[in-house]
Image (tube, rainbow, N blue to C red):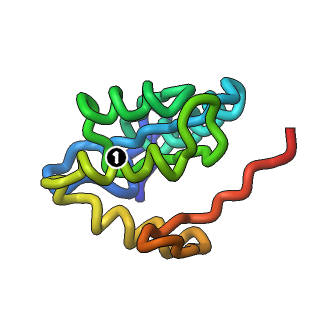
Amino acid sequence: MTTTSASRSPSLVRPDGQPVRVLVVDDEPNLADLLTMALRYEGWEIRTAHDGLSAVRLAREFRPDAVVLDVMLPDLNGLDVLRRLRGQQAGNSSSSEIASWVQSHFRTVSVGGITLYDLTQPAS
């Protein structure tokens, strides 16, 4: 990967060459901002939601390739959000490639047929 002072080329892109789309969902604004900044540095397109219902609405229009999702949200349980998002996911061709990349970088846990990627949040 080549890095220039003006911009950074994404290390992972969608099959059409566009940046990966990531939805960050966390009710703690500082943590959401930190994650958003780090992912944008990778060259990815990021949207942020601070509760479950907003995440589901935003995902419908943004169609993310990956979601960084807090499990404890103020309105919906994160697993409920994930189930709703999976129902909307049909037709997203790049998700399997991105899942492979994520699996190589994070520890995975399967719960009820859903694979979760463990990104431990620092204590508040």
Measuring from the top left, give residue 76's x and y in whole percent. Answer: 54, 37
Locate residue 12, reporting x and y percent: 35, 57
Tell me where residue 105 appears, x and y as whole percent.
Answer: 55, 69
Disc 1 marks which amino acid?
A: Leu
Q: Is residue 67 left or right of residue 18?
A: right
Quarter that holds the N terminus? bottom left
Q: Residue furthest right?
A: 123
| Residue nearest the viewer, comparing 53 with 109 | 53
Residue occupying image coordinates x 69% and y 34%: 31
Q: Residue sitting at 56 percent across and 26 percent down?
A: 50
> Pointer 1: residues within 10 angstroms few (<14), some, or many (20+)?
some
Can residue 68 be seen?
yes
Q: Position of residue 78 (x, y in %)?
A: 55, 46
- Disc 1 is placed on an element classified as helix
The residue identified by callout 1 is 85
Q: Residue at image x 24%, y 51%?
A: 89
Q: Is residue 20 visible?
A: no
Q: Quadrant of the C terminus?
A: top right
- Left or right placement of residue 27 versus residue 39 in this view: right
